[in-house]
Image (tube, rainbow, N blue to C red):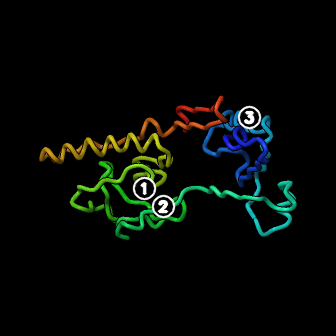
């Protein structure tokens, strides 16, 4: 929406394989954002697979000659290549590679044993994002957004201070309060902010 506002001569088109924009948002919030984009001339195509080599794809999104510039923003991907394989998940968003951790935010091996003498912590979107397995989650998957990362960093720092004092009585993390908050900019004069989404 900022591109549309600051560069009004640029025609913007968005597509998504999902049935509406901003998949994690409640329907009402997604509709609000979609209404804004429609009102400012941003073309939207949903239930639409990105197939840049298909002429039919370009016709479907009303760009028969293709786009001048394409930006592909699809999901999340782990970038934890620097960590030992024994600490990385084999599954998860983007095919895995997320750092395993315990309820104290300490990095663990796949078998659940603490790695790095329990002095290494993984917070935010680098970690696996959940504890346990469905349907018996100890903590269900946490969205990979900034608000939970901040709260998890606080939990890790609290436990780091406890360890520095020589104690082993660490405090367990919990479902981050900010995990249900989503902020979506709609240009410089509007936005959509959702709290307590689940």
Q: Secondary structure at mark 3?
A: helix
Q: Which mark is residue 36?
A: 3
Can you name the residue that lies furthest to the left here?
166
Q: Are marks 1 and 2 in contact (CB under 8 Å)?
A: yes
Point 35% across, 53% down: residue: 122
In the image, residue 71 sits, relative to residue 145, either above or below, namely below
In the image, residue 139 sits, relative to residue 82, either above or below, namely above
Q: Which mark is residue 42?
A: none
Q: CA distance from mark 1 to mark 2?
A: 7 Å
Point 67% across, 57% down: residue: 71
Q: Is residue 169 left or right of residue 7?
A: left
Q: Secondary structure at mark 2?
A: loop
First along the sequence among labels 1 and 3: 3
Q: Position of residue 177 (x, y in %)?
A: 44, 35
Query: Where does the C terminus fall, quadrant-wise?
Result: top right
* Foreground of the two, 136 or 109: 109
Q: Position of residue 21 (x, y in %)?
A: 69, 45
First along the sequence among labels 1 and 2: 2
Q: CA distance from mark 1 to mark 3?
A: 33 Å
Point 63% across, 55% down: residue: 73
Can you name the residue that lies furthest to the top here?
189
Q: Quadrant of residue 58?
A: bottom right
* Foreground of the two, 172 or 56: 56
Q: Secondary structure at mark 1?
A: helix
Q: Which mark is residue 126?
A: 1
């Amino acid at each position: 929406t900022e591109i549309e506002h600051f560069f009004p001569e640029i025609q913007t088109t968005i597509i998504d394989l999902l049935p509406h924009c901003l998949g994690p948002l409640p329907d009402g919030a997604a509709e609000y954002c979609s209404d804004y984009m429609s009102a400012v001339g941003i073309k939207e195509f949903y239930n639409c697979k990105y197939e840049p080599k298909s002429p039919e794809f370009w016709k479907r999104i009303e760009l028969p000659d293709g786009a001048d510039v394409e930006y592909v923003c699809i999901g999340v991907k782990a970038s934890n290549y620097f960590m030992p394989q024994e600490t990385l998940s084999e599954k998860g968003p983007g095919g895995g590679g997320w750092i395993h951790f315990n309820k104290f935010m300490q990095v663990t091996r796949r078998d659940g044993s603490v790695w790095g003498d329990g002095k290494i912590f993984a917070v935010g979107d680098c970690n696996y994002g959940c504890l346990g397995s469905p349907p018996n989650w100890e903590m269900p998957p946490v969205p990979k957004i900034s608000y939970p990362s901040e709260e998890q960093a606080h939990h890790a720092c609290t436990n780091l201070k406890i360890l520095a004092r020589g104690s082993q009585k660490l405090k367990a993390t919990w479902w981050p309060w900010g995990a249900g908050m989503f902020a979506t900019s709609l240009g410089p004069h509007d936005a959509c902010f959702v709290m307590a989404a689940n």
